[in-house]
Amino acid sequence: MRWEDWKFSARLGWKDPIVRWLSVSALVIVIAMGAFFLWRLLPEGWRSGVITMHYTIYIGIDDVRSWQWIFFVPGTALLILLVDIAIALGLFRRHPLASRMLVATGVMTAVVWAVGSFFLINVNI
């Protein structure tokens, strides 16, 4: 797909209210939860020097890293969501239903990520 084709498809997709509102709501969820995640965990990471990155109920804490890894979780979620929205906007002209489903999947993924981040905050604090 050429750049001009993607831009034309993205303009058409952004005019669709379903794609626009789902994209904006997914971005709001990811940015708000990322800000809350960093606000709650940065002081803890600076104080202790380490951060728990993974916890399971069967094993317990199984991944502890240096505090700089705290930016990996919200950064990865934002990057995946932006790629998802870019692909959905590029597909809109040929496949509007697939584009809407991709953006809806992005919202659902953002919600699951937000819940997982909340529990990661609880493990660290």
Image (cartoon, rainbow, N blue to C red):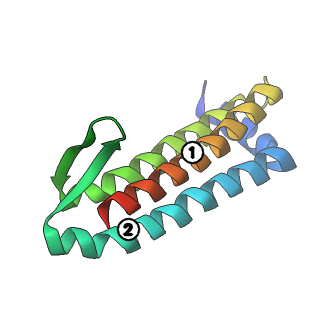
Residue sitting farthest toward the front: 58
Does label 1 or label 2 sit earlier along the sequence?
A: 2
Pinpoint residue 75: horizontal percent, then vertical percent. 40, 53
In this rendering, would 33 be left or right of 101? left
Which quadrant would the C terminus be assigned to in this image? Answer: bottom left
What is the tally of numbered marks visible in this picture?
2
Relative to 92, residue 40 above or below = below
Q: Which residue is mark 1?
A: 112
Kindly identify the residue that appears in the image at 61 percent across and 24 percent down. 1
* Residue 8 at x, y percent in the picture: 74, 38
Badge 2 crowding class, 10 Å Cα cut-off, few under 14, some 14 to 19, many 20 or more, is some
Compared to 17, does 93 lie above or below?
Answer: above
Q: Is residue 47 left or right of residue 102?
A: left
Q: In this rendering, which labeled residue sits more in front, label 1 or label 2?
A: 1
x and y percent of residue 41 in the render? 33, 68
* Mark 1 and mark 2: Cα distance apart in space: 17 Å
Could you say which quadrant of the image residue 74 lies in? bottom left
Q: Which residue is mark 2?
A: 38
Helix or strand or loop: what does disc 1 sit on? Answer: helix
Depth check, front residue: 115 or 83: 115
Task: Name the quadrant containing residue 108.
Answer: top right
Q: Are marks 1 and 2 in contact (CB under 8 Å)?
A: no
Residue 112 x %, y %: 57, 45
Residue type of the residue flagged with mark 2:
Leu
Kind of residue at badge 1: Val
Residue at coordinates 32% horizontally, 51% vertically from top-left?
72
Q: Residue at x 61, y 59 (%)?
A: 29
Could you say whether the residue bearing mark 2 is in a helix, strand or loop? helix
Viewer-closest of 110 and 78: 110
